């Protein structure tokens, strides 16, 4: 008996109240466990767990659906919706039936416009209730204007992005030309003039874009960027034009007097001598007086 009792205790380690053993004459003096505590049951494996209640789901009451009639113009629409839904969810259902945007809808119940966040049961909407749907013209106009404004901003943003792409390519040309001129290499002046003209074109394109808010800030940043590149190219142009004077100066230095009289100069002197001798005005001599 002690061995059997210890085995049962090992199988039931979590027992709020130790089981009592009763003698059963009908089974020849054997023993059986007393009934478990209320609310508990013993599983086939011997584990004591909370008793399962088969009636626990019977107390659950599902939220009922209601059928309401919605009048839009001369047409009635019947919709089935949960009684605990709000008018905003009803507008979403009506948008698919009527084609009206949810922001353009006004739901009138008992001669009062209902807010989208208001719940149907709190407003007294029941099965078979009638609701009137009208189109909100002011809201529709505001939504259309807002949509047009957003469309313009999107278009302006794309135009600025395209200009930025072109400016990036011109910036690479400016960096390359700057490296060449700083390295002592002369650049053809038409290349610099063409680069300035391209930058000015992008600046004009930026000025033609109408923008507000963040898009306006993006345009301003690109305008400052293009103006900076134009100033850099102007400085490079001045520096590049100054480099052209160096070979001209060297050419003048090469034409300096080398100790020999040029042939043209000798011919001019001979012609002058002949003319002076014939006129008898004066005689050219090489006998210089010394003092």
Image: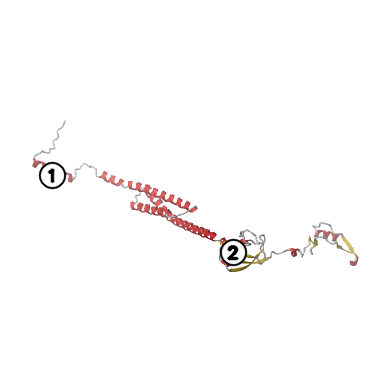
97 on left or right of 9 = left
- Front in this rendered view, residue 204 or 290: 204
The answer to whether residue 188 shows anywhere in this view is no
On the image, which quarter does residue 136 sit in?
bottom right
Q: SS for tag 2?
A: strand
How far apart, in angstroms, are the residues tagged by discs 2 and 1? 116 Å
142 on left or right of 236 = right
252 on left or right of 45 = left
**Which label was assigned to residue 79?**
none
Q: SS for tag 1?
A: helix
274 on left or right of 200 = left
Q: Where is mark 2, residue-wise? A: 133
Residue 41: horizontal and vertical position, in percent?
80, 62
Residue positioned 58% across, 61% down in the render: 106
Q: Which of marks 2 and 1 is in front?
A: 2
Residue 8: horizontal and vertical position, in percent?
83, 60
- Front in this rendered view, residue 227 or 47: 227
- Residue situated furthest front in the rendering: 111
The answer to whether residue 132 shows anywhere in this view is yes
Residue positioned 59% across, 65% down in the render: 94
Residue 44: horizontal and vertical position, in percent?
79, 64
Residue 228: horizontal and vertical position, in percent?
41, 48
Q: Residues within 10 Å of mark 2 (few under 14, many from 20)?
A: some
Please identify the quadrant where the C terminus is shown: top left
Residue positioned 15% across, 44% down in the render: 268
Q: Where is mark 1, residue-wise? A: 271
* Mark nearer the N terminus (2 vs 1): 2
Tags 2 and 1 in contact by the CB under 8 Å rule? no
């Amino acid at each position: 008996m002690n061995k059997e009792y210890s085995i049962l205790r090992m199988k039931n380690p979590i027992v709020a109240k130790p089981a009592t053993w009763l003698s059963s004459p009908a089974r020849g003096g054997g023993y059986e466990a007393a009934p478990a505590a209320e609310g508990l049951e013993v599983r086939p494996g011997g584990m004591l767990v909370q008793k399962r209640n088969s009636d626990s789901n019977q107390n659950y009451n599902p939220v009922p659906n209601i059928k309401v009639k919605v009048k839009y113009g001369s047409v009635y629409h019947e919709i089935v919706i949960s009684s605990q839904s709000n008018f905003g969810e009803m507008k979403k259902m009506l948008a698919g039936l009527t084609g009206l945007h949810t922001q353009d809808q006004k739901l009138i119940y008992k001669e009062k416009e209902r807010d989208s966040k208001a719940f149907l049961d709190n407003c007294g909407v029941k099965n078979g209730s009638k609701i009137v749907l009208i189109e909100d013209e002011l809201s529709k106009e505001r939504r259309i204007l807002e949509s047009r404004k957003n469309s313009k901003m999107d278009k302006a943003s794309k135009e600025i992005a395209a200009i930025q792409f072109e400016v990036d390519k011109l910036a690479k040309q400016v960096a390359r030309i700057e490296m060449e001129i700083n390295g002592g290499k002369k650049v053809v002046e038409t290349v610099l003039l063409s680069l300035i003209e391209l930058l000015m074109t992008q600046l004009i394109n930026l000025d033609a874009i109408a923008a507000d808010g963040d898009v306006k800030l993006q345009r301003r940043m690109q305008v400052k960027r293009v103006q900076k590149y134009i100033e850099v190219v102007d400085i490079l142009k001045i520096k590049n034009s100054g480099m052209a004077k160096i070979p001209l100066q060297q050419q003048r230095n090469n034409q300096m007097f080398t100790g020999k009289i040029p042939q043209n100069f000798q011919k001019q002197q001979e012609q002058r001598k002949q003319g002076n001798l014939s006129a008898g005005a004066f005689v050219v001599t090489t006998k210089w007086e010394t003092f």
